[in-house]
Image (tube, rainbow, N blue to C red):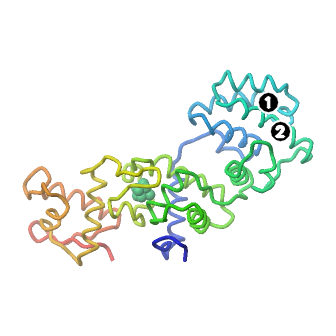
Amino acid sequence: MTDCQRPLPDDVTAVRRALVEWYEGDHRSFPWRETTDPYEILVSEVMSQQTQLGRVVEAWSEFLERWPTAADLAAADRADVVGFWTSHSLGYNNRAKYLHEAAQQVQSEFDGSFPQTPAGLSELMGVGPYTANAVASFAFDNGDAVVDTNVKRVLYRVFDVPDDDATFERVANDLMPDGESRVWNNAIMELGGVACEKTPHCDEAGCPWREWCHAYQTGDFTAPDVPTQPSFEGSRRQMRGRVVKVLGEHDEMNLDTLGHRIRVDYTPDGEYGRVWLRELLSDLSDDGLVEVEGAEGETVIRLQG
Ligand code: SF4
């Protein structure tokens, strides 16, 4: 058991599989996701530190055209590397200098081959623990779980992990399937990037963790970097969360009683009435969260067992 306020679910294998399948089914395509070359991945990581991913794509391709390998970069004139950085608005010039120096270290201290562990990679100039772990994961499938702001937000919301770095780290590693850091880190970062953003898009993004997600079930979407409730009061997500919460407190409920419990403005024949609620329940039922039995006035709703 972890130090979460709630333990990881018993079916942690299903939790893992759901995320990986969701990621593999569809995800944003970045060219550095198609390579396992540590040099190419390091360049993408350093560039992404201060620049939006969309803009990094072009700069990354041009950089690699000009200096295709770590050996080419090591042999380059440092002024040219810094010049490239500046002309592509990639942020602090120091990052270019460090990257150049790291490439030289690979040649001089590691016989031209990148170290393959987070600890080894951390010896390279300008490579901090986060970048070292990312390169170890994406190049060598040999990293620990990545724990960045996005990942913390996801873990906090889904498993109610307290806002504490050591616990985030432990839970993130407990969750990661052994030896699968490449796909896992990509998948959980994708979840934080396109579904569990500051304002989450649980349903629109088809979040694979809805059935386990504490925030989704309670409607409380605050997180360490989202101190106040994101502004979708009254939205479908919020209402779905309320339905699940209310049903969690009762064995079953009829349609109108439930409606009054989740909306103050519920009126059976109004805009937010039976038709609206049935539609909401039908989504929840498709997602395996609730059971709806009976028709019209006799409808009974309960959580799926
Ligand atoms: S259900 Fe929503 S809040 Fe929960 S992990 Fe998915 S996107 Fe985030």
Q: Nearer the viewer, mark 1 or mark 2?
A: 2
Q: Is residue 207 visible?
A: no
* Left or right: 206 as drawn, with respect to 290: right
| Marker disc for residue 236 | none
Q: Is residue 156 above or below residue 87?
A: below
Q: Nearer the viewer, residue 256 or 14?
A: 256
Instruction: Respond yes or no on whether mark 1 lies under 8 Å from ligand 1.
Output: no
* Left or right: 141 as drawn, with respect to 199: right
Per the model, the C-alpha gap separating discs 1 and 2 is 11 Å
- For the N terminus, the quadrant is bottom right
x and y percentages locating residue 75 in the rendered image:
88, 30
x and y percentages locating residue 150 in the rendered image:
52, 51
Residue drawn at 45 percent across, 62 percent down: 158
Q: Label 1 sits on what residue type?
A: Trp
| Marker disc for residue 67 | 1
Q: Would you call the spot at circle 1 few (<14 residues within 10 Å), some (14-19), or many (20 or more)?
A: some
Q: Is residue 125 above or below residue 2?
A: above
Q: Would you call the spot at circle 2 few (<14 residues within 10 Å), some (14-19), or many (20 or more)?
A: many
Q: Nearer the viewer, residue 136 or 5?
A: 5
Tell me if label 1 and label 2 are in contact, CB under 8 Å.
yes
x and y percentages locating residue 262 in the rendered image:
20, 61
* Left or right: 148 as drawn, with respect to 198: right
Residue drawn at 56 percent across, 35 percent down: 52
Q: Is residue 114 visible?
A: yes
Q: Earlier in the sequence, mark 1 or mark 2?
A: 1
Residue drawn at 73 percent across, 53 percent down: 136
Q: Is residue 49 above or below residue 263?
A: above
Q: Nearer the viewer, residue 241 or 282?
A: 241
Residue drawn at 66 percent across, 58 percent down: 181
Q: What residue would you read off at disc 2?
A: 103
Ligand 1, by image quadrant, is: bottom left
